[in-house]
Image (cartoon, rainbow, N blue to C red):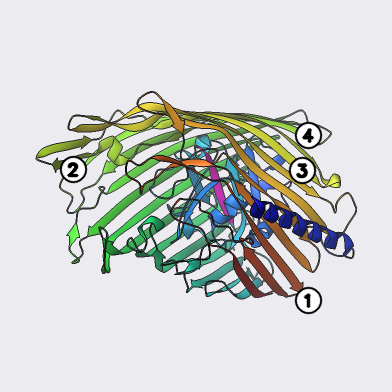
Amino acid sequence: MRASLWKCVMTLVMMAVWGLYAAWAADVGEPKEAQSLEDLVVTATRSEEKIKDIPAKIEVIHRDQIELTVGETITEQLKKNSSIGVIEYPGALAGIGIRGFRPEFSGITKHSLILKNGRPAGVTNLATLLTDNIERIEVLKGPASSLYGAEAMGGVVNIITQKHTDKLTGHVEAGFGSFETNFQKASLGGGLGPRFDFGIYGRRYDQQDDITMGNGKKRDNTSFETLNGGLRLGADLAETWRIDVSGDLYQGRDIETPGDIAYGNTRQQNKDLDNYGVDVNLSGNLATNNRLSSTFYYTGEEAVYHSRYSGSTIVPAYRSYDSEISWLGFQLKDEIAWSVHRFILGADYQTIEKKSRSYNRDGTRKAPSSPDESRDNWAGYLETVWKFLDGRLTATAGGRYDRFDLETLKTPYKVDFTPNSEGFSQLSLRGGLNYLFDAGFRLHTTVGQGFVPPSAFELAGYSETVVQGKTMITEGNPNLDPESSLTYDVGVGFERPEWGLALDVTYFHTDVYDKITSVQTGNYKTYINALDAEIYGLETMILFDFGAPLGWNRSLGLFVNSTHIFKAEEEQPNGTTKDIHNVADYTINYGIQYKDRMFDGKLHVRNQGRMKDTDWVTAGYPEIEYPSFAVVDLALRVKLFDHHRLLFKIDNIFDKDYYEKRGYPKPGRAFYASYSFVF
């Protein structure tokens, strides 16, 4: 108790000292970029709109925030800047959950959708998405299946990458840190004459030592190395027509995964991860009020696992499993303006194929645990944006029709199932209203549907397994419906730039229907739509910049971003309900941020509440409750002359011993420093 109190006091003291420095500093500098209602975003309607005009709840994480947030991955950015649910394991494995849905880190069917520049990111493990070359991250909270189809039930994260088209800009950075970490980054981009432009970036990150946990002990088998980079080429083809071709690559090599700490060093693995993608975007005006755009994309994700155990016995490392997933798609969108109103209509196509292989210790092949599968999806959508009362009232309404064909594929060495295929269709609708008042207030509300398709095996699978002389049968159900949801939210926002104040409070309520569960009757198991769930809570965002009302030429701001889950329960087959696992009662991010011409920095506190989970290492798999925790980070950047930057970061200042997933503790206190040359 005393230690916790001391940490709280020290955090407040650090905030106060920082605030006194800012008040004392000379009036030189430039205001910090922060989220504003005037920001243009594209995720909420698939067209550019100002945040203040959008009924849907959307948050923007700008480049400045990304650079001053401790953490190299997208999941670190999301949990520390947008208060969504995240689980991160050591060994490059992470997933998210938005608005009370459980975080998911594997598989092609999830409840939150990740986009890159508006197209599916083509990634199942979010630890492979890093922060380099990102201009901003748009986080749409609430269902968006009426725009994006499957998986957009809890929300959508859209990663917008940098695109330099004018003067040449670039940077070179090198740094080091705790756990024998060293890293190097470089980027270059800009115009090549009057019509062409380009962008290129690369990064290497090497953590050579194992992490030290908050209790001062080393966690064996946690070192890793990653490489990533990308290239973009763009050209203006005519007065309004433009083409961009881009590709990116991620490689994780010899990534060590320790297993649950309850097993000591007897469940260790290492893995190699690859993620790569290419897309081509062509856009231009068909008329002054009609803009057409198209995107072709292909992405791939590959993983190779080497195990160092067999049962509970440590053995020489052997290749135990590998997998590959590919996404191929095409998007066509037409934006039509009619007076102040806008119509966005388009078509999407995507095919996904997933394959996996398992191996014995001697290198021979064996049947994987699940069959190979594919999923084809055709869709058409229409979104309308209506403006009335001189732009004060904005109404949005739209819908999307999806057609899915799922197939379990013939899988080498897997002879206990029969390949099959099934299909289904889904219609999703959403509408919203937003009203602006003179005093800076706005009211916004939406009602929308979301859906998540069944897996190919749940819909069309068939397998037989002999257990103690009896043939156990598992069969898919071709009559399965997708899991579906209905969400409404209502919020009030306020922004007065001259006061330095912006805030938003949004209440949301989600009912989930037709959750898919398995039922066993004798030796026969199948899947049915039987269960429901209910989730509701409150999202809060507050920004206050002391520099604005005081007329400073610098920024000293307080920020709060939180999600409180009042209820997240799902029905059980016996008619009872229980808490949805891995969903925290609350997640609160708060702190202080400062910027002038020479210094900028952020002191950040992340406070996460209790949540329920299953204890997978105890007989009977009992339900357990995780404790709450608070972690403090600090980032400080110094700008020297026009081109030089020094950046210092401290992760987990007070060396908190905590975890997001029991059995997988997070690192203790860590220090990082880097120098960069910017031009």
Q: Is residue 28 above or below residue 474?
A: below
* Camera-nearest label, 4 or 3: 3
For mark 2, give the secondary structure: loop
- Disc 2 to disc 3, C-alpha distance: 57 Å
x and y percentages locating residue 250 in the rendered image? 46, 65
* Type of amino acid under label 3: Ala
Residue nearest the viewer, comparing 260 with 50: 260
Depth check: give the residue in front, 19 or 217. 217
Q: Which residues are magenta?
A: 153-160
Give the residue number, with chain letter if any, for mark 1: 641
Disc nearer the start of the sequence (4/3): 4
Q: Are marks 2 and 3 in contact (CB under 8 Å)?
A: no
* Disc assigned to residue 417: 2
Measure how far apart labels 4 and 2 are at the Cα level.
59 Å
**x and y percentages locating residue 244 in the rendered image:** 54, 60
Distance in Å between CA atoms under marks 4 and 3: 10 Å
Residue at 77% x, 28% y: name it.
Answer: 389
Which labelled disc corresponds to residue 128?
Answer: none
Q: Earlier in the sequence, mark 1 or mark 4?
A: 4
